[in-house]
Amino acid sequence: MNDPVMAQLYGLVGTAGNAEALRSLRDQIQQRMQSLLPSASVEQFNNDLNGMHDALIARGIYVAEQEMARMGMGSPPVPYAYLLFGSGGRREQTLASDQDSGMLYDNPPASMDGGAVKQYFYSFSQVIVKTLQQIGYPPCEGNVISSNPDWCDSLQGWMDKLDRWFEIAHWEVVRYLLIIADGRMVCGDRSLADRLKEHYFRDTLDHPVIVRRMLENTLRYKVLIGVFGQLITERYGPQSGSLDIKYGAYIPLINSIRLMAIQGGIRATSTLERIRALRDAGKLSEQDSAEYASAFRLFLRLRLYTSEATDEGTYGSSGKLAGSRLTKQLACELKRGLRTGKKLQRRVYRQTLGKLK
């Protein structure tokens, strides 16, 4: 990071002692970053922005841990790993970001009261969620969050849960399994997250029927380009003429790359890292990987432009690019990127079905 003001603000995050100070720093950093967005390299901007989110969330967890001690709950009784899912897990958060998270803690030894350990981490997760809300991260609307008991468990509990999920070809369960694929540790003991991921990929290879269901979920969102090459924009309502960048461009591409990565046993979670890993493993040609990466960077940049501050003082995003921004040049770039996304979806469909035969 070359900006000295940003570097100074980042340094202050690591010493902030409460949620209010972290919220103030977040606002200052994001205002600074918003002004840099038009001229910045999208990949570097994304790395800096997600580095900020990681630093704020990790410090928020530290503040929550100190709050647990002040409440008389003591320190964590066993090591833990705090996990991020969704765009946080992929390191692709925009200025707006909610809490998609999970708590993973080590199996308590026989000498410990397992129920008391479970209660500690459930309470700890609730404090973390509240702290992060104060910093400006609203809870996940789908309740994929560490304060939900289903997403707060010991390593063995998580492994048993994954085993059960892999035996059920239900749509919602398959969605959870895809969410886990994007998970990464933001704070705590990395070895716990690595052991969980290893168990996840071993289960995936043993359950081809789940991969078929993953394919159906992956292709749920269609690329918004018509059969004659036209952009498919919103037709009605206050956002008429806008293009749904999130669900009509970004999500179809990242979902397709994710499924390719899962089938290839690739542990990386960010889309660009997955593309590079697929190329290095010989599963994508140099030309295809460059084409997919270029389309992804375009969609990522446009998605960043859909974030804005809300009246409540948080950051929100409709995921839609206003029609007024769709210049002739941008429309041409978008059409090229969307054609790439559509081609990728067809490729994933053919390859996955071919492996399942």
Image: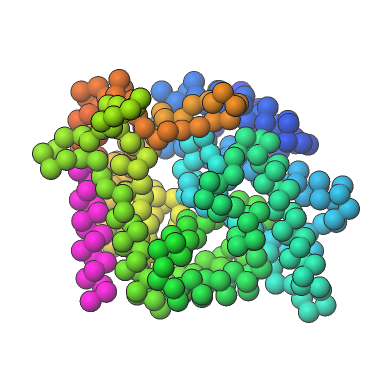
Q: Quadrant of residue 347?
A: bottom left
The residue located at (41%, 30%) in the rendering is 306
As displayed, is residue 244 above or below residue 349? above
Boundaries of the magenta span: 338-357
State the image coordinates of residue 121 (x, y, percent, origin top left): 73, 59
- Furthest residue to the left? 228
* Residue 348 shown in magenta: yes
Main secondary structure type of the part rendered in magenta: helix
Q: Quadrant of residue 330?
A: top left
* Residue 112 shown in magenta: no
The residue located at (55%, 46%) in the rendering is 140
The residue located at (39%, 76%) in the rendering is 207
Question: Quarter holding the C terminus?
Answer: bottom left
Q: Is residue 313 left or right of residue 128?
A: left
As displayed, is residue 213 above or below residue 310? below
As displayed, is residue 186 above or below residue 306? below
Q: Is residue 213 left or right of residue 72?
A: left
State the image coordinates of residue 162 (x, y, percent, origin top left): 52, 71
Question: Quarter holding the N terminus?
Answer: top right
Front residue of 330/219: it is 219
State the image coordinates of residue 134 (x, y, percent, origin top left): 68, 36
Q: Quadrant of residue 303?
A: top left
Q: Is residue 300 left or right of residue 119?
A: left
From where the camera sits, is residue 82 visible? no
State the image coordinates of residue 251 (x, y, percent, origin top left): 36, 46
Front residue of 70/7: it is 70
The residue located at (20%, 40%) in the rendering is 225
